[in-house]
Amino acid sequence: MSAYLGLFSNNILPIFLAAGAGFLLAKFLHVQPRQISQVAFYIFSPCLLFSILTKSQLNSADVTRMAGFTVTIVVAIGILTWILARFMRLERRMLAAVLITAMFSNSGNYGLSLNLFAFGEEALAHASLYFVIVAILTYTLGVVVASMGSASLGQALWGLRKVPAIYAVTLALIFIAAGLKLPLFLDRTVSLLGEAAIPLLMVLMGIQLAHATWDGQTRALSLTSIMRLIAGPALALSMSLLFGLQGAARQAGVIESAMPTAIVTTVLATEYNVEPSFVSTVVFISTLLSPLTVTPLLAYLGA
């Protein structure tokens, strides 16, 4: 028990305390998440990704394996959730809400921080790949699922032009392939902004959680929480063998797959009117429950 408490206090509690600061900020000073989210989305997160990828030792094989692993996890969770949700006879909007909350994990705000604290810089580099791929899937597959026929796949793909993380990753891959380096003043600027991204994302998570509400959809909430917090890591452990993930890559992939529901799903739910109150509830509850499943997983992966 003391080992679990140590893992929780050293790796997860700092994230919750930082998020708690954001939560209190939102409650008492009425800070809204949108502007801070935009700053993180357009400046800090792209700089973090570019800095991590260009300074890591990842090769093309690492990138390919993590990409295949991530897509497989997200799609498999979606299929399993769809099958179970159909048995539960959920109505169409609720089905879409359950799917997006089960498929897309909080691999940025929560996952990047946890991987850095628990397993270090190498795991953070692999976790960043997972985060980028999930972001791409969220703004393509997630949009299609949320819209349930009101938006075409072409429109969703066209929307990728608004995701700065994709440009950051593309540019980083070009720099890696060509052996290029930024001028020192730009490198220091990007590194400075990148280093600020993780604490900002933790505080932002608390601000966003402060706006969650409970709407009482117990059955659907139970399904999506189980799929996200239990089925996700269980599937990841088996898929890591299939894709040959080892060491830091395996640690990062499994932990990212075990994260609670992505906060960005609340944006999709609001935009396409698919039970936004329920989606906010799932984000809040799955985040609160996550230490119960993530802490023993950290112990297993670190053994």
Image (spheres, rainbow, N blue to C red):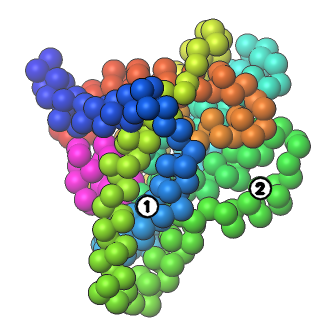
Q: Quadrant of the N terminus?
A: top left
Judge whether 87 appears above or below 159 on screen. Answer: above
Please identify the residue farthest to the front as the structure is shown.
Answer: 29
Characterize the local packing of mark 2: few (<14), some (14-19) or many (20 or more) Cα atoms within 10 angstroms.
some
Q: Which residue is mark 1?
A: 44
Q: Nearer the viewer, mark 1 or mark 2?
A: 1
Return the mark for residue 156: 2
Choose between 90 and 48: the one closer to the eye.
48
Choose between 141 and 62: the one closer to the eye.
141
Judge whether 61 appears above or below 115 on screen. Answer: below
Judge whether 46 appears above or below 38 on screen. Answer: below
Badge 2 amino acid: Ala
Badge 1 amino acid: Phe
Left or right of 266, for residue 69: left
SS assignment at label 2 = helix
Q: Hey, which quadrant is residue 217 in on the image?
A: top right
Q: Which residues are magenta?
A: 110-127
Return the mark for residue 114: none
Residue 115: x %, y % from top left: 30, 47
Separation of residues labelled 1 and 2 (CA atoms): 24 Å
Left or right of 24, for residue 83: right
Residue drawn where x is 24% and y is 36% of the image: 14
Residue drawn where x is 38% and y is 41% of the image: 203
Judge whether 250 appears above or below 25 on screen. Answer: below
The main secondary structure of the magenta stretch is helix
Q: Quadrant of the C terminus?
A: top left
Residue drawn where x is 86% and y is 52% of the image: 152
